[in-house]
Amino acid sequence: MKKIVVIGAGYWGNNLIRNFFQLGVLAGVYDLNSKLYAELERKYPGIVFYSRSEDIFLDNQINAVVIAAPAALHGSLANKALSAGKHVFVEKPLCLNIHEGKNLKNLAEQRDLVLMVGHLLLYHPAVKILFDIVKNNQLGKIRYIYSNRLSLGKIRREENALWSFAPHDISMILQIAGQMPWRVTTNGANYLTDGVADTTLSHLDFDNNLQAHIYVSWLHPFKEQKLVVVGEEAMAVFDDTKLLKEKLSVYHHKVEWDGKIPVISKADPEYLNCEDEEPLKNECQAFLNAIDGLSPPLSDASEGIRVLQVLDACQRSMLEGQYIDLDVGKS
């Protein structure tokens, strides 16, 4: 029987605790703030509350560790868990250093352990349908992709908006593009905390003239979480702020030519039916399935490293004030 411990009982850790408890595999919780334990004990009777993280790694009854700690701790905690023979599900980003990420991947492979990253939206029912229609060429050749992830908060001081928000969008864009960008350019600005960008705009160049951009900010007057995919035949919009029935739409707009004059023929949106599933529960179940050897997760260590490589290049571009070429080759 699988027994899982969640490290980190903050806002997002609480959601993970709830889901793994509902899936019947939650064995324990650890958080630096033990004052959280009383409420958790009332809601989730029968689980263990650890006073030291080291005790989790020494507990031979624990099969897997879920890490929802601050991003700066992801790498070291994942290393300790893997070294102790535990499967690991670590919230995004995998870690803050590409070399460290590759070492974690190698360690997991050497020990035949699952290392999965929490790129939640890959498990969203609407996004899974979007991936399918792209794969089945229903939009035609993809021309460009853009995403906006904007809100007022949640403001952080230990990581910037790029690292906090953009992993979601990078993971989706890389899945849709089916390739890595060969160049990235990022601009950003900080207004609240020196050295911590509150807003960033990243531009990604791919082969075959595919372009993408990602705009993130936690200083925005309203919430917007939107991904737009423009193809030669149709355009798709994933809007995560909409009701389920309107989250995924396809526009069959046409651009035809009257001599040398482009003529646009607009169409009403076609809303695609999506299953009423909680993406986080899907993600947690994917982790359990991977442990059982049923199927590898979409957000495995390799995918986590690809996202990390793009994040790192965007960060360097912002700091250096110039574009960054990724070592992926350009045809």
Image: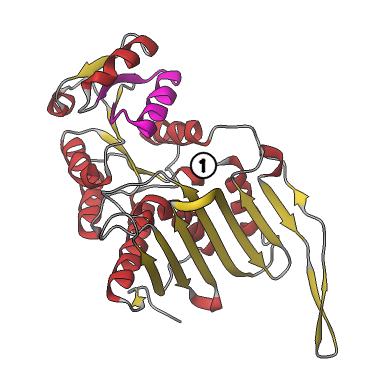
Would residue 303 appear left or right of 196 to someone viewing this image? right
Residue 39 position within the rendered picture, expressed as x and y whole percent measured from the top left: 34, 14
Out of 221 and 288, give the one closest to the viewer: 221
Rendered image quadrant of residue 313 = bottom left
**Which quarter of the picture shows residue 108?**
top left
Along the viewing direction, whichever of 262 and 175 lies nearer the viewer: 262
Rendered location of residue 213, percent (x, y): 50, 67
In the image, taking residue 300 as reference, residue 125 lies left or right, namely: right
Q: Is residue 190 visible?
A: yes
Secondary structure, mark 1, is: helix
Q: Quadrant of the N terminus?
A: top left
Say if 23 sits above or below 254 in the image.
Answer: above
Q: How is the image coloured?
A: secondary structure
Density class for disc 1 (Cα within 10 Å; few <14, some 14-19, many ≥20) is many
Question: 248 left or right of 187?
Answer: right
Rendered residue at 18%/25% (across/down): 56
Q: Position of residue 119 (x, y in %)?
A: 43, 46
Amino acid identity at mark 1:
Tyr
Circle count? 1
Find the magenta span and give its range: 6-30
In the current view of this chain or complex, which residue is farthest to the bottom?
260
Residue 155 on the magenta span: no
Check if residue 16 falls in the magenta segment.
yes
Residue occupied by mark 1: 123
Q: Measuring from the top left, give residue 155's x and y in whole percent.
A: 37, 46
In terms of depth relative to the viewer, which is nearer, 275 or 217?
217
Q: Residue at x 65, y 66 (%)?
A: 230
Q: Is residue 110 visible?
A: no
Q: Residue at x 35, y 67 (%)?
A: 314
